[in-house]
Image (cartoon, rainbow, N blue to C red):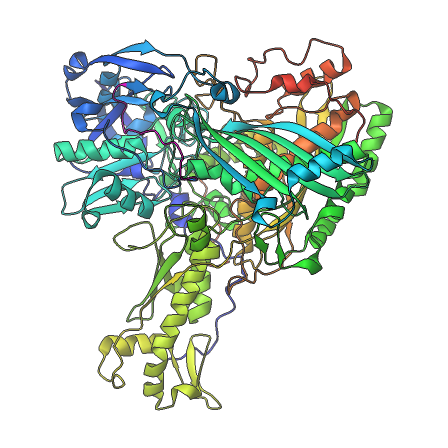
């Protein structure tokens, strides 16, 4: 067992973990952070994408012990004061999800992408999320959502922590 | 009294954002694997590495020693070998059905079949211990090729059946009286100077549905009712089938499909793992969870497609089709799935597609092999049929030197001819192929792209343009129960809804369909809102739990709206009729003088009125009911359609083929689909996008390939190549609308349309780009290697095209790579 100390979605945790435990298993099984999901066993699908110290990682490809001393942000930590992150809002507004299983990873990757490139072209979005697989949407509305979020997040707000540019809270309204 | 002063806007047709999104975008989800119950045990299944082998012995002693292991069981230990997993579709009276156990007892019949199960306090311990189970196998010869499997003296997958043929199913329009004899028409055409017979063999490769959420099941046996949570599309069917299969009292079972992450047909099953989880939970009296890895999913969850199609078309030289003959071999894999044998039969009615074909014969032989079983995958039988006929239309056009759209126009049912009864005996209620085609060709700039194609050819560009067409229809909205009965299907095709009017004016609508990404909560709420005149946000859709929704036939075959949505309409109508006498009593008026609009009963010609919510509250109090009227306006309705639903559309695809590398790049994709009345255009568009991606993926990227020993080569997402965002383009989609006349909403199914239509459009486009070099066919998926090989072998500039193609995804046994270079090259181009 190894002792680790992490900050996950703003809360500090200390745990003893098996050295082989993956970060995604730690999040799901130990912290109950089941918003982050597992879609494959070969790091192809990206469903488990989270941010580790501000950068997107596939949490199936990181050992929990590697997150020691680090800050982890999952899809569950994106809302600020009940307001959705602009990328979450854009996914809703643009019908960028169907079954929703890839969505947490897709949102986390999209936020990372916008951090690097605040105004990506369609092709840049497609290449920026190519490590995240979706079987429902054909990606078209995901691409649209990322570009929509980019517009809403202008100017200059840092993607992974911003709430200032958040669009209105999601309701049922069209 | 509160009445609705401002009638709500019409909800049907509105692009409502989805109700279900909020939880899914914030991670507040309830996937089956999220279930954490105190004392929960985890299982891992020991699986055969061999495709075909006798089990000589299983040594579980080492596994049992692992700390945290609760038990290690062989099939016999939990009675899993005696289970007969159900097949609900015996397509013929003499169909051969092997026993399909939950775990193999004495023989394994495909690589990945379960032979033992380890139970432990964590999934990791269970998996570690499973590695320690020693199984002694005697390998048998695998059975991999369908034609070889049917030959005399072939090794039998199931020796006790005496054959590898599961069943043969034939439709002949001459015998059915719905048309002439195809055999006679083809024989006559061969002798006639003014006709030709075009024969082709196409390969429908094996695919894997690859829902993003791996399958998972939790069984809790500790309550009075045994509760199963499962990542399933079919909780109701699963419950009834578990009762029938295992002899459990049905009223002691509860099945819950919580959040389910996609299915595409792949979660229509009574899976062996569901049964094993249940048997272990019963044995131990403890809650038990099984969650598969992606590799397990690719290896053992059912596959789809996998047909060899031999087609013959008799056609006059001016393009009038006289007959169609279809001979199929369909790979069932090692066992029969829930509806597996019926999947190719669904195609029987669709090979004639939108065309007026005077004589038609369909002959399908289902074959057992030692591969993972096949069953429904998005479209189920209809993509295969659409591919066959739409590829054939292009082949005929090439043969006749006709423009491919002109050939289609010459043969399709014109819009004045509806309702039209086809040669395969279906009656298409509505459609307008001309309108969809005209709009699609305009959006596509068909003529402009043909010019560009010509220019690139003249210039000899490295990147050549190909244009492919698919003018499709399909039958969905499964299904009229009488039709299913006539096809020997084991259940009906109705759907049910109950509407509960709550005292505060809110509405619970219980449905028997079981959504898993389709947006049912949103679309169904729109229907309820309009029919009852209540607010969209005041409706809750309840589904996926047999305790709240006790009656239903679940979600597949694009049926949820076209059948389930109509049950909601019928239930809402009953609510209004039950409320009417009470409203009349409240208004001191005659029922005959009341009209119900926008949620309000009004006395005609007056401003007196009472809202449906007021009636719900009055019924709750029940202080003042009219004489003999029960204080209840809740209602329950079941709808059984009289006909299928027939969406159609025109799909046009342009691809760029790099003639130096064989790489195919999508260049433009336009589709105009007619799905009848649209409840929510946003959801319809999303369904089309996703459907297109899957159909295009069959054309370009995906194949479940096996090696010569029966090992699945594409057993991870590294090898089974789903398209990523970077592999696809933005599609131009639009709708024409001819409302269905067989249901009161005028809706048609949309869930499968994109997948059914798109595959042949893409392959036709790829071939259109390279026919100029003498290429006549390329097997799917049309990978760069295959395209490059086809071009070079046709040009005679490289090795032969029939060299073993084991390096590229999708290559493998059963592929008809040799067809690439078969002699009957037509040459030329469209």
Left/right of residue A29 with respect to residue A171 in the rendered view: left
**x and y percentages locating residue B162 in the rendered image:** 38, 23
Placement of B175 over or under B562, stated as above or below: above
Secondary structure mostly seen in the magenta stretch: loop
**x and y percentages locating residue B465 in the rendered image:** 76, 30
The N terminus of chain B: image quadrant:
bottom left
Residue B740 seen in render: yes
Residue A79 seen in render: no
Placement of B346 over or under B421, stated as above or below: above
Placement of B446 over or under B19, stated as above or below: above
Q: Nearer the viewer, residue B686 or B807?
A: B807
Left/right of residue B393 with respect to residue B595 in the rendered view: right
Give the residues drawn in magenta, as a range: B92-106
**x and y percentages locating residue B423 in the rendered image:** 62, 48
In terms of image quadrants, where is residue B637?
bottom left
**x and y percentages locating residue B568 in the rendered image:** 41, 62
The residue sitting at 29% across, 43% down in the picture is B241
Q: Nearer the viewer, residue B628 or A168?
A: B628
The residue sitting at 56% across, 20% down in the picture is B815
Left/right of residue B673 with respect to residue B596 in the rendered view: right
Q: Nearer the viewer, residue A62 or A160?
A: A62
**Does B286 appear in magenta?**
no
Specify the farthest residue to the right. Answer: B458
């Amino acid at each position: 067992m190894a002792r680790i100390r992490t900050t996950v979605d703003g809360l500090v945790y200390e745990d003893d973990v098996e050295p082989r435990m993956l970060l995604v298993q730690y999040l799901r099984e130990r912290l109950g952070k089941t918003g982050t999901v597992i879609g494959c066993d070969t790091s192809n699908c990206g469903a488990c994408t989270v941010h580790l110290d501000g950068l997107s990682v596939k949490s199936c490809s990181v050992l929990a012990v590697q997150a020691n001393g680090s800050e982890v942000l999952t899809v569950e930590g994106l809302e600020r004061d009940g307001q959705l992150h602009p990328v979450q809002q854009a996914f809703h507004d643009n019908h960028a999800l169907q079954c929703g299983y890839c969505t947490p990873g897709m949102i986390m990757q999209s936020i990372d992408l916008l951090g690097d490139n605040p105004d990506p072209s369609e092709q840049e979005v497609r290449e920026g999320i190519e490590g995240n697989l979706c079987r429902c949407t054909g990606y078209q509305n995901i691409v649209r959502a990322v570009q929509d979020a980019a517009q809403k997040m202008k100017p200059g707000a840092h993607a992974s922590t911003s709430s200032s540019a958040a669009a209105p809270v999601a309701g049922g309204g069209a | 009294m509160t009445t609705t002063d401002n009638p709500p806007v019409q909800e049907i047709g509105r692009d409502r954002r989805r109700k279900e999104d909020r939880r899914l975008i914030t991670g507040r989800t309830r996937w089956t694997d999220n279930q954490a119950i105190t004392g929960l045990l985890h299982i891992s299944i020991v699986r055969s590495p061999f495709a075909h082998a006798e089990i000589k012995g299983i040594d579980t002693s080492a596994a049992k020693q692992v700390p945290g292991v609760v038990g290690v069981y062989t099939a016999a230990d939990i009675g899993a070998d005696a289970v007969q997993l159900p097949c609900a579709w015996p397509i013929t009276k003499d169909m051969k059905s092997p026993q399909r156990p939950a775990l193999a007892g004495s023989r394994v019949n495909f690589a990945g079949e379960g032979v033992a199960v380890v139970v432990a306090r964590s999934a990791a311990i269970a998996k570690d211990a499973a590695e320690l189970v020693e199984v002694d196998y005697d390998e048998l010869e695998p059975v991999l090729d369908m034609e070889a499997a049917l030959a005399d003296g072939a090794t039998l997958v199931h020796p006790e059946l005496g054959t590898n043929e599961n069943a043969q199913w034939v439709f002949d329009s001459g015998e059915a009286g719905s048309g002439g004899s195809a055999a006679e028409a083809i024989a006559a055409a061969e002798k006639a100077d003014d006709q030709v017979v075009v024969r082709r063999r196409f390969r429908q490769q094996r695919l894997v549905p690859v829902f993003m959420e791996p399958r998972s099941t939790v069984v809790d046996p500790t309550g009075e009712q045994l509760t199963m949570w499962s990542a399933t599309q079919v909780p109701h069917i699963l419950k009834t089938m578990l009762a029938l299969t295992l002899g459990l009292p049905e009223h002691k079972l509860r099945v819950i499909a919580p959040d389910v992450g996609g299915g595409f047909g792949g979660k229509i099953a009574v899976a062996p793992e569901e049964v094993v989880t249940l048997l272990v939970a019963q044995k131990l009296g403890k809650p038990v969870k099984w969650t598969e890895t992606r590799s397990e999913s690719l290896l053992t969850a059912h596959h789809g497609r996998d047909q060899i199609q031999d087609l013959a078309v008799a056609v006059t030289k001016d393009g009038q089709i006289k007959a169609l003959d279809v001979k199929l071999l369909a790979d069932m894999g090692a066992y029969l799935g829930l509806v597996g044998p019926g999947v190719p039969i669904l195609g029987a009615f669709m090979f004639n597609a939108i065309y007026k074909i005077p004589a038609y014969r369909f002959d399908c032989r289902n074959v057992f092999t030692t591969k993972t079983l096949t069953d429904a995958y998005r479209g189920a039988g209809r993509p295969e049929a659409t591919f066959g006929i739409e590829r054939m239309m292009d082949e005929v056009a090439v043969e006749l030197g006709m423009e491919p759209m002109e050939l289609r126009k010459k043969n399709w049912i014109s819009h004045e001819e509806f309702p039209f009864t086809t040669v395969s005996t279906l009656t298409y209620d509505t459609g307008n192929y001309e309108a969809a085609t005209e709009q699609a060709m305009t959006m596509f700039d068909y003529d402009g792209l043909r010019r560009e194609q010509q220019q690139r050819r003249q210039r000899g560009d490295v990147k050549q343009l190909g244009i492919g067409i698919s003018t499709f229809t399909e039958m969905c909205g499964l299904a009229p129960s009488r039709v299913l009965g006539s096809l020997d299907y084991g259940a009906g095709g109705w759907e049910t809804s109950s509407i509960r009017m709550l005292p505060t004016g809110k509405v619970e609508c219980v449905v028997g369909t079981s959504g898993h990404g389709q947006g049912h909560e949103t679309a169904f709420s729109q229907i309820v809102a309009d029919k009852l005149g209540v607010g969209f946000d005041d409706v809750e859709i309840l589904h996926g739990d047999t305790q709240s929704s006790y009656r239903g036939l679940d979600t597949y075959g694009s049926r949820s709206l076209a059948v389930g949505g109509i049950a909601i309409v019928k239930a809402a109508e009953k609510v209004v009729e039950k409320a009417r006498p009470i409203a009349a009593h409240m208004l001191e008026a005659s029922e005959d003088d009341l009209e119900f609009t926008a949620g309000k009963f009004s006395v005609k010609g007056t401003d007196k009125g009472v809202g449906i919510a007021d009636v719900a509250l009055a019924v709750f109090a029940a202080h003042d009911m009219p004489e003999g009227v029960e204080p209840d306006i809740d209602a329950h309705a079941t709808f059984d359609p009289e006909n299928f639903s027939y969406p159609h559309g025109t799909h046009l695809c342009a691809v760029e083929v790099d003639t130096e590398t064989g790489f195919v790049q999508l260049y433009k994709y336009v589709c105009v689909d007619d799905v009848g009345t649209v409840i929510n255009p946003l959801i319809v568009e999303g369904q089309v996008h996703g459907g297109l991606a899957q159909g295009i993926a069959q054309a370009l990227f995906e194949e479940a390939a096996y090696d010569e020993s029966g090992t699945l080569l594409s057993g991870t997402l590294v090898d089974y190549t789903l398209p990523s965002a970077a592999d696809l383009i933005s599609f131009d989609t639009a709708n024409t609308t001819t409302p269905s006349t067989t249901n009161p909403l005028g809706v048609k199914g949309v869930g499968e349309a994109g997948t059914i239509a798109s595959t042949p459009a893409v392959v036709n486009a790829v071939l259109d780009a390279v026919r100029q070099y003498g290429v006549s066919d390329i097997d799917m998926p049309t990978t760069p290697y295959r395209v490059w090989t086809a071009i070079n072998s046709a040009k005679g500039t490289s090795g032969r095209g029939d060299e073993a193609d084991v390096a590229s995804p999708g290559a493998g046994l059963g592929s008809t790579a040799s067809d690439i270079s078969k002699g009957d090259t037509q040459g030329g181009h469209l």
